[in-house]
Image: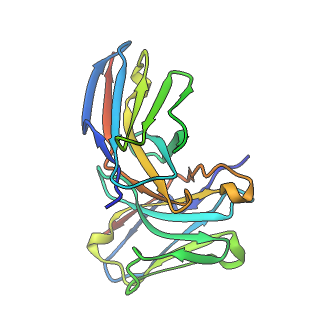
Amino acid sequence: SQQGEEDPQALSIQEGENATMNCSYKTSINNLQWYRQNSGRGLVHLILIRSNEREKHSGRLRVTLDTSKKSSSLLITASRAADTASYFCATGYNYGQNFVFGPGTRLSVLP
Amino acid sequence: EAGVVQSPRYKIIEKKQPVAFWCNPISGHNTLYWYLQNLGQGPELLIRYENEEAVDDSQLPKDRFSAERLKGVDSTLKIQPAELGDSAVYLCASSLPQWAGGDDTQYFGPGTRLTVL
């Protein structure tokens, strides 16, 4: 299976703390994308990182990719209650056109 | 720029009835995806189109599911007949691949929540 697997399955933190979620996969990828999904809503794209990149930033988000370990991490700094959501990684293969999603990490940020 | 549009947003049907979902991708996006998402799980690919061609339908249960993307723009996903286990959210996404000048980012629609009674 080429499925990405997020870790932990659930994470609960206080507002202002940092949240780190990890994604591991099994085969070589072209890219990896992180998404956020609020309850009952669609998926919102956060960051795409390509296999030849090691780190990308977007606002309070930082994504790293370690292709030697077949893993990626998503760091959310200074978390807010509005960051409460499920976060998914999607590993892209077949020239970055096919994506396989993991089961997600459910993040709860407590005020 | 308008996002991916899906309709209906919600659908409740009885088992053995047919149902259809419609998707309008972002203008100019060559690639269109249909995913199924069960509660508490990540999306699972059903079919991927490149323009009007279905290039990956290996996960589509072809005995009851069908899809089409006429003219390479809008797409329709159909289930006939629906079963209780088909209750899920059906997501449509589109992207513009690198070879076409894009960056492979997938953009998702809001989904159609199907309940089969």
Position of residue B78 measured from the top left corner of the image (x, y, whole percent): 48, 78
A93 or A39, which is in the foreground?
A93
Position of residue B15 measured from the top left corner of the image (x, y, whole percent): 31, 78
Q: Residue furthest top?
A: A16
Q: Would residue B54 be found to the left or right of residue A43 on screen?
A: right
Q: Is residue B95 above or below residue A47?
A: below
Q: Quadrant of the C terminus of chain B?
A: bottom left
Q: Which of the 4 image quadrants contains residue B94? A: bottom right
Can residue B117 be seen by looking at this rendering? no
Position of residue B49 measured from the top left corner of the image (x, y, whole percent): 59, 71
Q: Is residue A89 above or below residue B55?
A: above
Q: Residue furthest bottom?
A: B63
What's the coloring here? rainbow
Q: What residue is drawn where x is 51% and y is 21%? A: A60
Please state the total of marks drawn on the protein image: 0
Position of residue A88 measured from the top left corner of the image (x, y, whole percent): 39, 44
Q: What residue is drawn where x is 30% and y is 77%? A: B83
A54 or A110, which is in the foreground?
A54
Q: Which of the 4 image quadrants contains residue B93? A: bottom right
B88 or A64, which is in the foreground?
A64
Can residue B56 be seen by looking at this rendering? yes
B29 or A81, which is in the foreground?
B29
Q: What residue is drawn where x is 37% and y is 18%? A: A18
Q: What residue is drawn where x is 35% and y is 58%? A: A2
